[in-house]
Each structure stands twice: as structure tokens, then as C-alpha cells.
Amino acid sequence: MADALASNTASSSRKQVLLSWSSGKDCAWTLHVLQHRPNVELVGLLTTFNEAFDRVAMHAVRKKLVEAQAAAAGLPLWEVPLPWPCSNDIYQQRMAEAVARANREGVTHVAFGDLFLEDVRDYRLKMMAGTGIEPIFPIWCGREGTPALAEKMVAAGVRAIITCVDPKQLDPSYVGRTFDGDLLASLPAGVDPCGENGEFHSFCYAGPMFKQPLAVKVGEVVSRDGFQFADVLAA
């Protein structure tokens, strides 16, 4: 009886964490970090999807692949559908509904994979204020910390496909490439190795956060809305 009581007390003292999930390498690494924190219980992956195309916004990743990531992580996927186009008011409304659900289900923290953009962090803090749920930033490292972080990810076995490139910041030829040591070595000076300035976005298909790697391949490459996109398909 005492052992059961102690177990229940320990469980209730753990942070109940919902992870903001874009499908990319940074949120995947955040998942890995949280998986190794004894005071954390992960409850799900929170993802916004474009209703018109059934894809993750900006990353342009198909929902079926995000579902495969969630299965490989052993976590439920919390879907937030967004219309296209989507105003900021509608976005905030849909996210507020997701946070309200999280509150009802006992979530205590929402984790974000942000690295150094203060304005993004401030926005998240503002949006979460007064909700009863605390935002946390487990892999925040500052602008100077991203080269070492990128190398640490690659050394740990993280692999991702570059799904979107901003041609104003990085050559379009990088779209569809694999995030690995060769890519890091080839990035021009001034490009953040984690793409934190929006130079590129990615889809993580392998790493220590997953039970097994996902079999994927690169499909069609297109230019759209001023960005270069590579479609990722199940292999």
C-alpha cells in the first residue's frame, strides 16, 4: 500500500508535458531531451495542419508522415486544423481551444523547440499567460549555441530531409537534401546551421527519439509563394 502511494505521489509530481510539433529536427531533439528527464511525462505532440492541403504549415509535410512520427515516438498526435488562408485571429482561437483542452486533461507545460529568437519566445509567453499552463524551452541555446547543437544532433543519429528553403537566404538546391554532417559542412557563412532564421525547414525521419526510423523518399520539388519545397513521401 505504501509503495503504491509513493508511486502515485511520484507520478503526480511529474510535469505533464505537451510538445509543440512541427515535424522538424528541432522539435524532434526537444522530444529526445524530454524523454531523458525523469520529472517529465510526455502526453502528446501538438501539430497545426493546413486543412486545405492536409500538411504541416511551412514544413509542407503530409499529415500521414506526422502520424508515422507520432507512432514511432509512442505518443498521441493532437491535431489543430487551420483554414487556408488563416488569419492570426483564427490561429490564436484554434490554439486557445487546444490549450483549453490541454488544461482540462491535466497538462501542466507546453514545450517548444525554439533556439534563440527572442520575439518568438516572447510571443509564446504572452499567448500562454493566464492559461494555467507554463511554456518551457528545453533546447534554448542562444545564437552562438546552434553550431554545437546541430553537430550534437547529427552525432546522435538525427537525420532529416530539408523540406523548405527560403531562396532569399539559402540556395534552392538545398531543398530535398539530408540534414547531416555533409550538409552542415557545406552551409554558407551567415546561414544558421539549425535554420533558426527561417533559412530552411525539415522533416525528421530518424533519431534516438524514435523507436525505429521512418522509410521516406524525396518526391516532387516545386516553387511556391516565394519558397522552394520538396515533397516527402513514404518509401
Image (cartoon, rainbow, N blue to C red):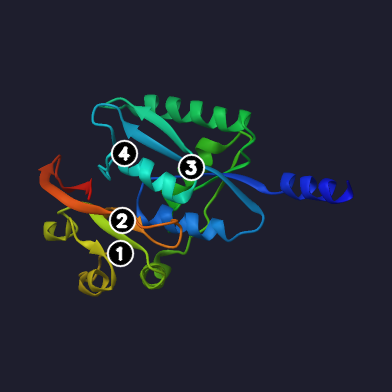
- Disc 1 from disc 4: Cα separation: 29 Å
Q: According to the image, label 3 marks what residue? A: 124
- The mark nearer the N terminus, 2 or 3, is 3
Task: Kindly check if marks 2 and 1 are in contact, taking CB atoms under 8 A apart as contact.
Answer: yes
Q: According to the image, label 1 marks what residue? A: 192
- The mark nearer the N terminus, 2 or 4, is 4
Q: Which sits in the foreground, 211 or 90?
A: 211
Q: According to the image, label 4 marks what residue? A: 64
- Disc 2 from disc 4: Cα separation: 27 Å
Q: Which sits in the foreground, 166 or 12?
A: 12
Q: Is residue 165 visible?
A: no
| Lateral position of residue 190 relative to residue 76, left or right | left
- Disc 2 from disc 1: Cα separation: 7 Å
Q: According to the image, label 2 marks what residue? A: 197
Residue at figure coordinates x 73%, y 44% from the top left:
12
- Disc 2 from disc 3: Cα separation: 17 Å
Residue at figure coordinates x 44%, y 62% from the top left:
208
- Disc 1 from disc 3: Cα separation: 22 Å
SS category of the residue bearing label 2: loop
Q: Give residue 179's quadrant in the image.
A: bottom left
| Lateral position of residue 59 relative to residue 213, left or right | left
Q: Position of residue 11 (x, y in %)?
A: 72, 47
Question: The residue under label 4 is which amino acid type?
Answer: Lys
- The mark nearer the N terminus, 2 or 1, is 1
Question: The residue under label 3 is which amino acid type?
Answer: Arg
SS category of the residue bearing label 3: helix
